[in-house]
Image (cartoon, coloured by chain):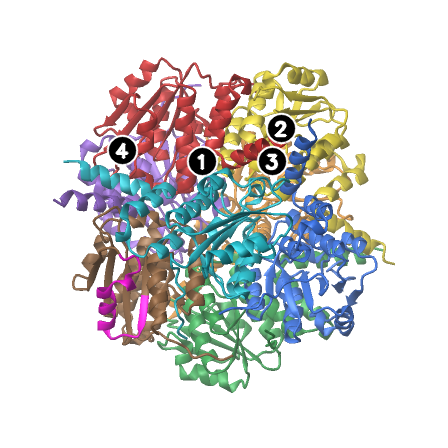
Chain colours: A orange, B yellow, C red, D purple, E blue, F cyan, G green, H brown
Amino acid sequence: MSTSYTRLDKNDAAVLLVDHQTGLASLVRDIEPDKFKNNVMALADLAKYFELPTILTTSFETGPNGPLMSELKETFPEAPYIARPGQINAWDNDDFVEAVRATGKKQLIIAGIVTEVCVAFPTLSALAEDFEVFLVTDASGTFNALTRDSALDRMSAAGAQLMTWFGVACELHRDWRNDIEGLGTLFANHIPDYKHLIESHNTLQSTP
Amino acid sequence: MSTSYTRLDKNDAAVLLVDHQTGLASLVRDIEPDKFKNNVMALADLAKYFELPTILTTSFETGPNGPLMSELKETFPEAPYIARPGQINAWDNDDFVEAVRATGKKQLIIAGIVTEVCVAFPTLSALAEDFEVFLVTDASGTFNALTRDSALDRMSAAGAQLMTWFGVACELHRDWRNDIEGLGTLFANHIPDYKHLIESHNTLQSTP
Amino acid sequence: MSTSYTRLDKNDAAVLLVDHQTGLASLVRDIEPDKFKNNVMALADLAKYFELPTILTTSFETGPNGPLMSELKETFPEAPYIARPGQINAWDNDDFVEAVRATGKKQLIIAGIVTEVCVAFPTLSALAEDFEVFLVTDASGTFNALTRDSALDRMSAAGAQLMTWFGVACELHRDWRNDIEGLGTLFANHIPDYKHLIESHNTLQSTP
Amino acid sequence: MSTSYTRLDKNDAAVLLVDHQTGLASLVRDIEPDKFKNNVMALADLAKYFELPTILTTSFETGPNGPLMSELKETFPEAPYIARPGQINAWDNDDFVEAVRATGKKQLIIAGIVTEVCVAFPTLSALAEDFEVFLVTDASGTFNALTRDSALDRMSAAGAQLMTWFGVACELHRDWRNDIEGLGTLFANHIPDYKHLIESHNTLQSTP
Amino acid sequence: MSTSYTRLDKNDAAVLLVDHQTGLASLVRDIEPDKFKNNVMALADLAKYFELPTILTTSFETGPNGPLMSELKETFPEAPYIARPGQINAWDNDDFVEAVRATGKKQLIIAGIVTEVCVAFPTLSALAEDFEVFLVTDASGTFNALTRDSALDRMSAAGAQLMTWFGVACELHRDWRNDIEGLGTLFANHIPDYKHLIESHNTLQSTP
Amino acid sequence: MSTSYTRLDKNDAAVLLVDHQTGLASLVRDIEPDKFKNNVMALADLAKYFELPTILTTSFETGPNGPLMSELKETFPEAPYIARPGQINAWDNDDFVEAVRATGKKQLIIAGIVTEVCVAFPTLSALAEDFEVFLVTDASGTFNALTRDSALDRMSAAGAQLMTWFGVACELHRDWRNDIEGLGTLFANHIPDYKHLIESHNTLQSTP
Amino acid sequence: MSTSYTRLDKNDAAVLLVDHQTGLASLVRDIEPDKFKNNVMALADLAKYFELPTILTTSFETGPNGPLMSELKETFPEAPYIARPGQINAWDNDDFVEAVRATGKKQLIIAGIVTEVCVAFPTLSALAEDFEVFLVTDASGTFNALTRDSALDRMSAAGAQLMTWFGVACELHRDWRNDIEGLGTLFANHIPDYKHLIESHNTLQSTP
Amino acid sequence: MSTSYTRLDKNDAAVLLVDHQTGLASLVRDIEPDKFKNNVMALADLAKYFELPTILTTSFETGPNGPLMSELKETFPEAPYIARPGQINAWDNDDFVEAVRATGKKQLIIAGIVTEVCVAFPTLSALAEDFEVFLVTDASGTFNALTRDSALDRMSAAGAQLMTWFGVACELHRDWRNDIEGLGTLFANHIPDYKHLIESHNTLQSTP
């Protein structure tokens, strides 16, 4: 049963960051907080690096859910920012869908808090409208592993592709020669082991 | 491969609580008991909150399986209650199926003890009769993770959607504005972290 | 997407126990040894209880793989016993396939050591010949969880249904009233928690 | 829903070892290093044992990614070796694809570092060109279990078969009688438990 | 090496609840939130049940650390409540130490957030002043297991006794006959498994 | 810092089995139920095998705690059996202490449910009266690992020696030649892996 | 058994960072890399914040062990830096011990790679010379948990106190009022959850 | 509380390898088999490298316990080899104790199968006779973690020092300059990550 390879293309992809809010972040217990924050910022940094249109949205940010993580605001000062007045599924908010359509992109890279709601609902809605959805599982968080795995199964069964931020970056970049230093810096900033490899390498190379 | 989004609708959904009995509960070892009880009651409370028709059923409740958890009886004093005389698959009991059909609903939200039997069997039967089945994985329990994962794979392969109680509540509610306080109370009662967010927020807001 | 429920039927099912040998058992590390042995014997006991035709087979039993577990020999003294001279996939052995066909059953309940070989290979072969295959995941063992999960994914994708011994017993039995004591004894012998429930219940009932 | 059994055939299979480099190896954290190295070398040894055409490739081996693991070079001194100048997906490198096609094989056995990139990308590309892909999950490594599981789901959904090195060896060998000592040696070298079984057995047999 | 048994005595024990605040609670990741909240409230309820003098204290409660959990305020409306203006170690706050001394008790039962700071510091201070300290490990929480285990080792080495709330309750109660219903209710409210045992038992007993 | 070796001596040891009741058993979640039941029965069987004086005691056995596990009653039909009317610490019950003293033994081997109460309290009491206490950690169970580890730390700090049933059996037996078959049978009955070793060995030896 | 509280004092403490080198870092597998790097830098930052004399040392930094992590060099440009020519135990290097003694401090806060060697050896040496040693367990890393736990047991038994970086910071700071913003910044930079609490708090406070 | 540093000295240490037999190895489940075998051989190789007197002993090697692992025999063809006729505690065998005393060493490095018996018993015996005992925890194996941890606690409380093979090698070697290549080879042979570091380093250094 052969299949075509639905492959991320930096000219046809947009990024949706859904409800990465400071209050909701305290609910995330399926990924360690240090790692989760790093994953979210890695996704944000790669979106910026590849100049992908990026859309920010929040749910009830003046209430207990809290404001958007400040680093995201700072990374995307010009991005469309939809503070939803009440819709739980971002796709039920016309401004959000309009912003998505305005990008003109067919491929949606999505992540958020919490996985089974803020990520799953717009993912399922977008798939139903023939978008290709690439779910960034490690930049999405929720209460525990059972909840996450149930949600991933639901989305995968509906046709979403499960990826992590490193795979997204590599599939978008295609060839190191497009920009060795740029991609290397992205990795060094978010993967300590990779940074260590680079430091070992550079030190040895610069030794006469 | 686009798919339509089979979405929970509070006007078209019923809840089936299968064999949440005090004896059987001692068999549940794939979820910690504090969390499991909380999940079951959260599902019950959301069923009541959304006024979904709810059906209770038990297996051999006068034997070692024990009576229905008392909190469930108290939450649904008027619900159809089918104490099955012997059928392991609730769907093999005519009263149960009749009660399900009497709700007139097409979407079934199901949970129970144990996952691979009391949940899986009626799930597979209902799917075979064209119901849409939404399995609440975290309000269902069984002997261990391998047993659970095998059962979830079987049900998912047959077309059931895997969800958890929080996702069910959010998909049913659609928009916070339908009732902010009601949903917030449901969450506060069953998610300590959420309750803490609300308390921090309210305390600060009420400080001049 | 409705599906028909392919349901175990005690009149149409046979059990295949593949390579539960004393040497191979030392390779099983994805399930604790106490629990694994218990699961294997529970499956054997239910096969006997439901009088399902059962086929035993071993691989190279005079070598390091060791003899069949003695309890299995004792449980099924009359069962077809195919000591394969070399074929790794039992389905490549004509005597084995003949024995399977001789049962006249369409549903095969299978377990063995190791999961990704001795279970997966005949499972895939049988599915290709239109048998319905029910894999007993907890009576099958292998090196580690990654190996098991890879094998289960391969078999599930090919159409095998993943079950565990308790689910098999319940799906075969259908209704407690067919024999309350028989099924209760089976469970008491292999589920300590269930035995404790029964003892608590019986003690209290017998107290005036 | 019957399916045909797409079975590994030693006359129709080639092995692709992608980016098993000494620097990249430090990124692998989803499998313990002792076990991972053992799995990689077991796959290499079985490729050699079955005389399967094997292709080696590396990414940026003069940089931080480091050289190919020395044992692999030593095991396959004559194998095609494609040091990719920049393409992240090996399938984007014409020399690599040419080398694959030159084998004339339809079945590809693949492993590499990291799973979601160096393994997943060529897997998806090869599936799209109607190759049969058998992914060796335990000879492939990456950052953590969530990343791996997401990648395996993506590849499985696209039609790749998930296997581990032991299953690959057994499916290729078919029958112990083809070469008992050869296969036994392969297992003894990479499975300590199996070696112990053999030593116990041989010692006892040689005792008068 | 015999030792005397330093045993909790309800006439000589006081309870110290340190910094169970709604903001700090989001830092607790070594115990699941459902269980942790339950453990904290179980300790509070037993303190009240045994009428032990109880002292509440908070750190910077008007800042990000947040207010005291509301349930604790409600459980101990009359308890000494020391909102520390800055001292991290509660024992550095004279009002707190005075409140402790005012109880006239020699045995201190302590719990708090986070374990290695808010619990460990006053524990070490109190031990240095010859109090007997009983640390309630499961009503104390912190960032992760390594942090907790390091802190428990430090306190144990200094002479603190490690206990959990259930052991504290039992050691204080001594004999069920002192009040069967009271203790049973405490357990039923905080141990779902125990509640289920009671319900099974009572149902059966009340059946004629 | 040399120490004398306080070594179990079958002529100076008694066994105390505390509250292994069918209701309480449902509270044990730090050890898998199959394994726990096996450990308890292994300890019972070794006590009988070495003819150690054994004392049974229960807490409130007519209530929810349930009756003593039936297998224990059957194993020790003549043993002193103290059904405590209310004392939580068995050592607070005069009949129990008298029964212990009546054995005339200095070394006490103890296990029970739950570890931090029914085991820890009499352990600490006995140590305070200069008994040597050997705690069988794997035949004692409780709510979770944190509770167990806290209790073990408390008992170890007070001078109890932590052992498991296999170590107890070996330390009592001293020399295989005292009775090879007896000890081998004990191990075969409770360690599946050991039974498999014996079966492999015997089969090979009996092959001409 | 009362004990005096050996408490960290910022006027009497020095920090020893042993062998945090980029090559050795790839050996650390008992803590996730994101978290480990964060912990190491948190310790470095607190050393700088409290102006504690800090000593850096490396082992064979021109070989495979690699150079010191660049961030540490940048944080402590003026610190004594002892590149040991071969001594595995830093305390065997006279320059190192001299640098330690030159600080005039009695309390040593130590961390490094790997725990059982580079940390344990100088810890045991320093304890033998009457220093007070505070081991920062979460800024020290090694091959796996068993190795770490064995090493921690050895050091704890010799009198070292086990702490983590957060506890060290709090014990040194004593009172928030000494510098609220400084300590808050340290925490926000290294504890995402704490940063989120601060952002939620500040946002709400700044809302009119 | 200062302590002297009881430090391994290659001129005063002997190695005891107790019951590393092929049958007993199948009982080891607290460490993965690949890693365990590697650890045992690493300890053997370091014993040989440092030319430490080494003593081999086995228990009932003609029975199910099986022969000594062949690699150990090959590594130490001249070592004293005591096949114990029945004593479970090797220290109860006069030949063994005599062999230990004949080494003239005061420091004993010990490992074996299973930890709580074959290792713990001679450890406790040797400590009672004033030997210094260094237990190699990762070259010792047993049924599960609870058993191991109980045994380690017992030995640590009696004065044994817990180490792992890498720490033993480093403490014996003292200074890399004593033999860089020899120690490096030992590490490369048993630590894949270290081998990779060396290969990366050497490749880069040899590049002009």
Q: Amino acid at mark 3?
A: Ala
Secondary structure of the residue carrying numbered label 2: loop
Q: Which residue is mark 2?
A: B19
Chain holding disc 4? D
Looking at the rendered structure, the secondary structure element under dot 4 is helix
Q: CA distance from mark 2 to mark 4?
A: 47 Å
Answer yes or no: is residue B181 visible.
yes
Q: Is residue H95 magenta?
A: yes
Q: Which residue is mark 3?
A: B25
Say which of marks 3 and 4 sits in front: 3
Residue holding disc 4: D172
Mark 1 = which residue? Answer: D155
Query: Tag 4: residue type?
Result: Leu
Label 1 element class: helix
Figure quadrant of the C terminus of chain A: bottom left
- Name the kind of residue labelled 2 in the image: Asp
Q: Judging from the image, what secondary structure is the residue with disc 3 in?
A: helix
Q: Is residue G145 left or right of residue C202?
A: left
